[in-house]
Amino acid sequence: MSTTMLPSYWNWIIPSVVVFVLIIVGIILFLYLTINPNYEIKHLPAVSSPVLLVDATPDSDRNTLMSTSDRNTIMTASDRNILTTTPTSILIDDASALFNKAKSVWSIISKNAATADIHTIHGNVLPANINSPLDLQSWSSSPVSRSSSLKIYNRLGLRVLQFDYDLEFLYGGSLNGRGAYLDGITVVPSRITVAWCYVFNANVEITSIRNVGTSDNPIAAAHIELKYQLKALSRVEGTTSFDVKGDGRVDILHMK
């Protein structure tokens, strides 16, 4: 090879190598951002969350008391009626008959953004023979708020989602001095960080309501599911289940 051909040779090989390296980097980046079959999912309760031990009876203000139980809880059948959410047009003159007179399913995250009505939509568990939470007395002065964080990592150990949220509800409402009912049940996003090329959606569903007290002194309870989906070319879905009660208790039943 003559010395006159060397500059021409290097002028060709160097751009080719650069293009090849850029293609390889692009493929690796594409795989990282889209095709990630091995996810690691972490549910992290907020450190600052106050706690109420399961089945404990609070002696002080219960507004800030919550459960630290993150283990799966098996609910056994009892002699109490378990009532699913029912339209408000069905009314029964019985304070122990419970109905959700607000929303039972709603979206809180749509395409990586919080929905516009997250602060106005909620569920409740009220007596069938009343029409509004304003008809009840002795509501908690402020909502219970249980903070949690969902983090999803790809197979390279890099975080592709962080979703911080607060489970909130009012409790303790009574009718003529009887019962403990629920209002303002909702999940409010506080932080959403999603990697480029991913789409995150989440919704809340109150799947069932029931009376965990007695006919003379009903204690409302609601089973709440936070369902989420993160997708690109691959997809991960999961559900976190909560159980809230009219006396202010919160249990995390299931995370996956």
Image (tube, rainbow, N blue to C red):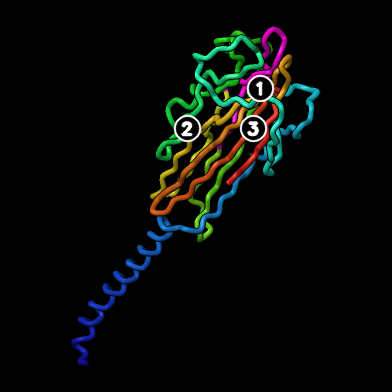
Q: CA distance from mark 3 to mark 1?
A: 11 Å
Q: CA distance from mark 2 to mark 1?
A: 24 Å
What residue is shown at x 52% (from left), y 24% (from top)? 122
Three-letter amino acid code of the residue under disc 3:
Asp
Residue 108, numbered label: 2
Q: What residue span does the magenta drawing correspond to?
A: 165-184
Residue 243, numbered label: 3
Q: Give the image location of residue 148, x and y in percent.
A: 60, 39
3 and 1 marks in contact (CB < 8 Å): no
Task: Tell which tag, 2 or 1, sits nearer the viewer.
Answer: 1
Q: Give the image location of residue 102, x and y in percent.
A: 51, 20
What residue is shown at x 78% (from left), y 25% (from top)? 58
What residue is shown at x 62% (from left), y 42% (from top)? 254
Mark 1 surroundings: few (<14), some (14-19) or many (≥20) residues within 10 A: many
Element class at badge 3:
strand
Residue 220, numbered label: 1
Quarter in which the N terminus is drawn: bottom left
Q: Quadrant of residue 65?
A: top right
Task: Tell which tag, 3 or 2, sits nearer the viewer.
Answer: 3
Residue 152, numbered label: none
Q: Give the image location of residue 113, x and y in percent.
A: 43, 36
Mark 3 surroundings: few (<14), some (14-19) or many (≥20) residues within 10 A: some
Reply above or below: 229 against 27.
above
Reply above or below: 229 against 143.
below
Q: Quadrant of residue 21?
A: bottom left
Q: Is residue 81 left or right of residue 194?
A: right
Three-letter amino acid code of the residue under disc 2:
Ile
Q: CA distance from mark 3 to mark 2?
A: 19 Å
Q: Earlier in the sequence, mark 3 or mark 2?
A: 2
- Indicate whether residue 180 is drawn in magenta: yes
